[in-house]
């Protein structure tokens, strides 16, 4: 029996509800597939902050180092400013463990309806390779003259050649495994004349090493429009932290719902644990009502299984998701139905 050490951080809002669903689906496969998750839960998040004045206990993030993977729910609540909760929990984990790739598949699952008229699963099948440790979310910047009339704030987008290169390299390698062999680079080098000029230069250099892959360069605004008007022409996207964050919400929306989209925060070198989470946030408006769609978290669980080397189990989870969406009998409210989180979880367990 193969054993995997997992840190589960359910977090805020609907995070615990969808993470429980994801763990139930994975655990249902354990015996059959010959592995066991040894999962330790960490109660970190906004409630922890209200009790202790911090989102994570002192030394807590470092204590995750010994785990093979981190399975994360969501962060954000009305009680804690978002820039504190995000910068005390999720972004430090990504930076500390050098999870420089944020892998975000955006795929219209069978049976789901895209808001784009006439588009089906063959048209919407993209994956974003989002830079995850630097760029616009480097955390560099500050306030001057705080609270005074001349108050000033700056946020310094920080790009390194090495950071761009390793990210783009991952994107091209991924494109090699996909049938269309296309990479779209999200740039904005007409207006961002330093950082995005470096981005473009490094992308061109990396592209030169992948003559079997076609590179297309788009300004990010044009790429956003193309994802709506011609999604079938977009395959692998390489993007900076902020651009990738925005494009993937768009990609999830055209795939039917933010509730179904997964992500993996990867350290491809495997020196540090990688982290898997749905891309959606804590959705305080529906938290506690038992109606959150667990598919994003379950699919993120499949990405985690794949990362752990449990490829057959991962494929079974994805097939179960596809079966349930294709059948169309169980739909949570984000997909236009009235099913609960438990209904969807049970349908996925049944499909397994
Ligand atoms: N499960 C993802 C989550 O809680 N996201 C909150 C958020 O806004 N994160 C910022 C980011 O993904 O960069």
Image: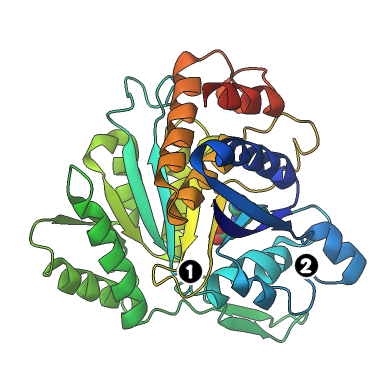
Please tell me whether residue 230 is drawn above or below residue 265 in the rendered image. above
Q: Nearer the viewer, residue 306 or 322?
A: 306
Query: Pointers 1 and 2 in contact (CB under 8 A)?
Result: no
Q: Residue at x 64, y 48 (%)?
A: 281
Q: Residue at x 49, y 44 (%)?
A: 302
Residue 352 visible in the picture:
yes
Percent of width and height locating residue 51: 91, 65
Dot in front, 1 or 2: 1
Where, by quadrant of the figure, is residue 144 drawn? bottom right
Return the mark for residue 310. none
Q: Nearer the viewer, residue 45 or 316?
A: 316
Q: Residues within 10 Å of mark 1 (few under 14, many from 20)?
A: many
What residue is shown with label 2?
A: 55
**Residue at the outermost bottom position:** 145
Horizontal side of 54 relative to 155 (left or right) equals: right
Horizontal side of 192 relative to 98 (left or right) equals: left
Q: Residue at x 52, y 33 (%)?
A: 257
Residue 333 visible in the picture:
no
What residue is shown with label 1?
A: 99
Percent of width and height locating residue 128: 37, 52
**Residue at the outermost right position:** 51
Give the quadrant of ligand 1.
bottom right
Q: Residues within 10 Å of mark 2 (few under 14, many from 20)?
A: many
Query: How far apart are the alpha carbons under marks 1 and 2?
Result: 20 Å
Where, by quadrant of the figure, is residue 185 drawn? bottom left
In the rendered view, how is the structure colored?
rainbow
Please tell me whether residue 180 is drawn above or below residue 332 in the rendered image. below
Horizontal side of 149 relative to 163 (left or right) equals: right
The mark nearer the N terminus, 1 or 2, is 2
């Amino acid at each position: 029996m193969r054993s995997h050490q997992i840190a589960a951080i359910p977090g805020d809002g609907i995070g615990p509800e969808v993470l429980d669903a994801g763990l139930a689906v994975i655990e249902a496969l354990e015996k059959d597939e010959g592995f066991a998750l040894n999962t330790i839960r960490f109660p970190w998040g906004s409630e922890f902050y209200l009790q202790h004045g911090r989102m994570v206990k002192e030394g807590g993030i470092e204590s995750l180092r010994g785990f093979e993977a981190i399975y994360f729910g969501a962060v954000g609540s009305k009680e804690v400013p978002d820039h504190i909760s995000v910068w005390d929990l999720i972004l430090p984990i990504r930076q500390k463990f050098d999870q420089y790739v944020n892998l975000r598949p955006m795929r219209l699952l069978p049976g789901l309806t895209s808001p784009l008229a006439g588009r089906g699963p063959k048209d919407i099948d993209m994956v974003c390779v989002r830079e995850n440790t630097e760029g616009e979310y480097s955390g560099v910047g500050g306030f001057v003259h705080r609270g005074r009339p001349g108050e000033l704030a700056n946020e310094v987008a920080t790009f390194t050649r090495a950071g761009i290169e390793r990210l783009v390299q991952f994107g091209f390698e991924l494109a090699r495994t996909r049938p269309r062999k296309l990479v779209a680079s999200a740039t904005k080098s007409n207006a961002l004349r330093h950082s995005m000029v470096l981005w473009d230069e490094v992308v061109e250099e990396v592209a030169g090493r992948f003559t079997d892959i076609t590179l297309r360069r788009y300004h990010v605004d044009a790429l956003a429009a193309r994802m709506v008007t011609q999604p079938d022409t977009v395959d692998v996207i390489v993007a900076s932290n902020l651009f990738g964050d925005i494009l993937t919400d768009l990609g999830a929306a055209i795939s039917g719902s933010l509730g179904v989209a997964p992500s993996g925060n990867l350290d491809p070198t495997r020196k540090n644990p990688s982290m898997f989470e749905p891309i959606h946030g804590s959705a305080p408006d529906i938290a506690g009502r038992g109606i959150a769609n667990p598919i994003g978290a379950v699919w993120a669980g499949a990405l985690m299984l794949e990362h752990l080397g449990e490829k057959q189990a991962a494929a079974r989870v994805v097939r179960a998701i596809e079966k349930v969406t294709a059948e169309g009998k169980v739909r949570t409210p984000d997909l236009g139905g009235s099913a609960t989180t438990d209904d969807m979880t049970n349908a996925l367990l049944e499909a397994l």
